[in-house]
């Protein structure tokens, strides 16, 4: 087993090291997950951006495996919450119990829930009630949990990865817009190709299962997150990101026709934050020290697809948010 | 040149190199995009030059291309292209992922991030590896292809024969003619100023009028009709200045002097020669001094002669006739002093007549100059009209042109003008012979649009010395009996000329036919008649 590098708290972390370490993490995850390079890359980007991701895909596409493997690779605490209709918020954030010490004194003691981990897998999140779903809001945004007027800070790095099944919509509770907006990106998990299926079969049905190495740790991830935020971005690139966000709002004069026709409400400022953060990390992963238009374009789909609230016409005509975001990318010029 | 010491300086130096290439690329792109505009304007103006008589139409047609070329040259020179923009465009064209623009912007920021220096160094390295020729020249081939059409159209129109060139040449000829006439008017004004015989007020008035005419002609140098109208007005004005009886008075005075000399000295050979007015005055003054020495018979004889002369001069010079009659009466009454006084008054009349003749000569010279100029201008216009008719119908129209081109014989008082007039008679006055073999001058030969020869009107000229008409003063005072004319021709001509002019102005007569009428009256005017 490879040990993660020992990183001093104030040690300088260069962009090259960032890229190399990210490649190593991707490679280790790739030992377990066959194909799905975009999924792995976007999940890693979400992790390095300090955000949360919503994975949407049919069952059996290794969503859970991915998160579990990632937790192993970065040597972080992992917890899995299976969302069901009877799941209560306390089941997630924890609860206060009366406990008696050895001297017979009784006191309230907070028992942390599964949310107190570095990587939290919220499996089939849309099967829980909105009340339970909303229990994640504070944790996802502020990385804190408030129980009985007490604020509990979650251990950094904190990363929620939620999954939902797009097929079985019976008895589900679609995530509200406020909840969706908390996810840095929504990743569509695609079905593997035939070659990948063969490789999956070879790897998972043999006598020896692949074992990923620990190539990072929480401290390293935090430093990588810090470095990512220092990537410079030019004002005209920033303006392009702003134009992209503005273009998702149908009531603005610069909105393209496809946005006017199919979008009910566009992306929030969080969407722009997501674009920029993802752009910065993509730039570093690409070996650059500045954000390019291409980075924003690459980040646009996962960052905006769940933030564009479609209207009835789009749903009736079967127009997906991906098509709309692509249309916006085509209409908004980068110069 | 100092080597750059920081990545930012290196980047600036490299961006300046790239900027030059970008400006050149922009200029070529602008040129290729806008070429069709310049060529289309070129073709349109060339086409316009084939339908409208535009002076210097070739230069006008080429001017859009010159303007376009100027814009193409000025565009890269004066178009603002800041380095930030250069960096952005280089990033875009060379796929540098916004490296250069970000680095340039980072340098201007006050707060520096952890990666700023590294980023600028990275951008400087990338920028240093860029060669300007890596920036491609862009030319929209579709636009260039479309530019070929107006190019060929314009070139074809430029080199194909243009029917408007002939019209433009005619116009230029008219302009030159007007300028030439204006110059002749100026020379005439100078001659008038040098003529000492003229009265001061007459000279000033004539100079002023000629100056105004000169200015009008220069203002209307390109307008044939206006110039013709100015000349016609001037001609009419000067016609009014002519005193028809001046020549008659001069002739009568000279004849009177000759008759008196013949009567007193029949053997004198000089009596057959007509004396000039100065000699007439001197002769009369001598006669007045000799009255006291004359015998009564001689006085009676002189009184009879003076009476006879007085009767003959009643029509042409009533004042002189009255003085002669008074002198005759005084002689008959034996009052030689009164007779001498009256004869001296006649001598004074002769001197005044001589001054009037000088003034008339100056006016006639000016009139001749104006008439000649008008005829030259009219000829230029007729040629233009002929060109237009030929271009439209293929008819030559020469039948009507000859009658109108026979001008130039009006100013016979100048030696130079006389020679021109004679030449003009030979060349421009076609002569026909009637059934009896008499030679007649064609005075009007109208042009017919069908090209057929018009009906000829002719009149028999009176052949005097050197082909000029001689004025004979009749001996009988009764009109129509033994006189050369019932009413002096000079007296009625201005009225007829004015009436014809007014009729031409009122009637819808083609311009070139109007000129025939004017030419007709020009040849009949008294100024063209010999003394």
Image (cartoon, coloured by chain):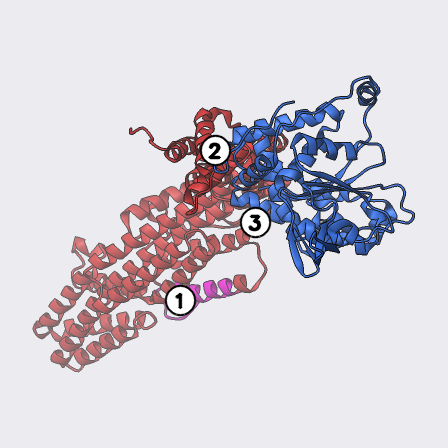
Q: Which mark is residue B22?
A: 2
- Look at mark 3 in the image and give the residue it sits on: B446
What shade does chain B have?
red
Relative placement, left or right, of A177 versus B342 is right
Mark 3 or mark 1, whichever is nearer to me: 3
- Residue A237 within the segment the image draws in magenta: no
Which stretch appears magenta?
B474-502
Mark 3 or mark 2, whichever is nearer to me: 2
Q: Which mark is residue B491?
A: 1
Report whether residue A246 is seen.
no
Say which chain tag 1 marks: B
Callouts 2 and 1 on one subunit: yes
**Quadrant housing the C terminus of chain B:** bottom left
Chain drawn in blue: A
Q: Nearer the viewer, residue A190 or B230?
A: A190
Q: Earlier in the sequence, mark 3 or mark 1?
A: 3
Give percent across and percent down for residue B454: 60, 46
Instruction: Tell me how far mark 2 sits from mark 1, CA to CA.
Output: 87 Å
């Amino acid at each position: 087993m490879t040990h993660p590098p020992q990183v001093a708290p104030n040690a300088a972390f260069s962009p090259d090291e960032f890229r190399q370490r990210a490649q190593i993490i991707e490679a280790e995850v790739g030992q377990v997950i066959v194909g799905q390079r975009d999924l792995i890359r976007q999940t890693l980007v979400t992790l390095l951006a300090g955000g949360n991701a919503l994975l949407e895909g049919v069952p059996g596409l290794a969503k859970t495996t991915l998160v579990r493997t990632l937790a192993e690779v970065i040597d972080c605490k992992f917890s899995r919450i299976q969302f069901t209709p009877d799941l209560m918020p306390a089941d997630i954030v924890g609860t206060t119990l009366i406990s008696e010490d050895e001297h017979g004194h009784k006191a309230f003691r907070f028992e942390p829930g599964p949310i107190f981990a570095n990587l939290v897998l919220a499996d089939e999140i849309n099967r829980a009630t909105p009340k339970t779903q909303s229990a994640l809001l504070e944790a996802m945004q502020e990385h804190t949990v408030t129980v009985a007027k007490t604020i509990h800070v979650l251990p950094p790095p904190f990363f929620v990865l939620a999954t939902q099944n797009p097929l079985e919509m019976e008895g589900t509770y679609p995530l509200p817009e406020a909840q969706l907006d908390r996810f840095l990106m929504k990743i569509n998990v695609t079905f593997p190709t035939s070659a990948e299926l063969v490789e999956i079969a070879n790897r998972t049905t043999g006598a020896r299962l692949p074992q990923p190495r620990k190539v990072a740790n929480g401290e390293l991830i935090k430093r990588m997150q810090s470095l990512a935020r220092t990537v410079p971005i030019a004002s005209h690139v920033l303006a392009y990101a702003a134009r992209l966000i503005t273009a998702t709002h149908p009531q603005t004069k610069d909105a393209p026709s496809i946005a006017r026709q199919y979008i009910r409400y566009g992306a929030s400022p969080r969407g722009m934050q997501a674009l920029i953060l993802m752009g910065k990390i993509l730039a570093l992963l690409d070996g650059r020290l500045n954000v390019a238009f291409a980075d924003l374009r690459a980040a646009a789909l996962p960052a905006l697809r769940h933030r564009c609230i479609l209207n009835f016409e789009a749903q009736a005509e079967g127009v997906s948010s991906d098509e709309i975001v692509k249309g916006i990318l085509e209409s908004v010029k980068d110069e | 040149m100092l080597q750059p010491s920081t990545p930012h300086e290196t980047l600036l130096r490299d961006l300046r190199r790239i900027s030059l290439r970008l400006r050149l690329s922009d200029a070529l792109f602008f040129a290729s995009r806008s070429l069709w505009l310049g060529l289309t304007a070129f073709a349109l103006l060339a086409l316009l030059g084939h339908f409208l008589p535009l002076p210097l139409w070739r230069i006008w047609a080429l001017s859009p291309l010159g303007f376009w070329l100027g814009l193409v040259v000025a565009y890269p020179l004066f178009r603002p292209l800041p380095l930030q923009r250069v960096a952005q465009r280089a990033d875009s064209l060379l796929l540098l992922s916004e490296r250069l623009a970000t680095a340039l912007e980072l340098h201007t920021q006050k707060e520096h991030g952890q990666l700023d220096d590294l980023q600028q160094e990275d951008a400087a390295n990338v920028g240093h590896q860029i060669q300007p020729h890596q920036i491609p020249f862009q030319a929209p081939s579709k636009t260039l292809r479309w530019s070929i059409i107006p190019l060929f159209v314009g070139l074809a129109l430029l080199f194909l024969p243009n029917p408007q060139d002939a019209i433009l040449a005619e116009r230029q000829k008219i302009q030159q003619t007007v300028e030439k006439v204006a110059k002749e008017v100026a020379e005439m004004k100078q001659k008038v100023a040098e003529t000492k015989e003229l009265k001061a007020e007459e000279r000033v008035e004539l100079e002023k009028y000629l100056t105004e005419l000169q200015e009008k002609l220069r203002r209307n140098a390109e307008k044939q009709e206006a110039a013709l109208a100015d000349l016609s007005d001037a001609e009419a004005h000067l016609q009014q200045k002519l005193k028809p009886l001046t020549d008659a008075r001069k002739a009568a005075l000279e004849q009177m002097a000759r008759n008196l000399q013949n009567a007193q000295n029949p053997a004198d050979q000089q009596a057959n020669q007509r004396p000039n007015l100065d000699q007439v005055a001197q002769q009369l003054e001598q006669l007045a001094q000799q009255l006291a020495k004359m015998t009564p018979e001689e006085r009676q004889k002189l009184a009879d002669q003076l009476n006879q002369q007085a009767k003959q001069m009643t029509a042409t010079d009533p004042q002189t006739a009255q003085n002669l009659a008074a002198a005759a009466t005084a002689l008959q009454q034996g009052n030689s002093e009164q007779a001498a006084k009256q004869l001296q008054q006649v001598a004074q009349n002769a001197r005044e007549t001589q001054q009037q003749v000088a003034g008339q000569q100056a006016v006639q010279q000016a009139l001749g100059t104006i008439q000649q100029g008008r005829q030259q201008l009219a000829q230029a216009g007729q040629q233009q009209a002929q060109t237009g008719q030929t271009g439209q119908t293929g008819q030559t129209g020469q039948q009507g042109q000859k009658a109108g081109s026979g001008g130039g014989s009006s100013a016979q008082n100048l030696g130079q003008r006389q020679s021109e007039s004679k030449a003009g008679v030979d060349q421009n006055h076609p002569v026909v012979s009637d059934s009896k073999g008499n030679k007649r001058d064609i005075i009007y030969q109208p042009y017919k649009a069908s090209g057929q020869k018009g009906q000829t009107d002719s009149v028999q000229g009176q052949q005097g010395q050197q082909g000029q008409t001689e004025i004979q003063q009749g001996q009988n005072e009764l009109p129509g009996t033994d006189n050369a004319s019932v009413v002096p021709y000079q007296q009625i001509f201005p009225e007829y000329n004015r009436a014809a002019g007014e009729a031409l102005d009122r009637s819808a007569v083609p311009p070139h036919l109007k000129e025939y009428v004017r030419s007709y009256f020009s040849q009949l005017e008294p100024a063209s008649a010999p003394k």
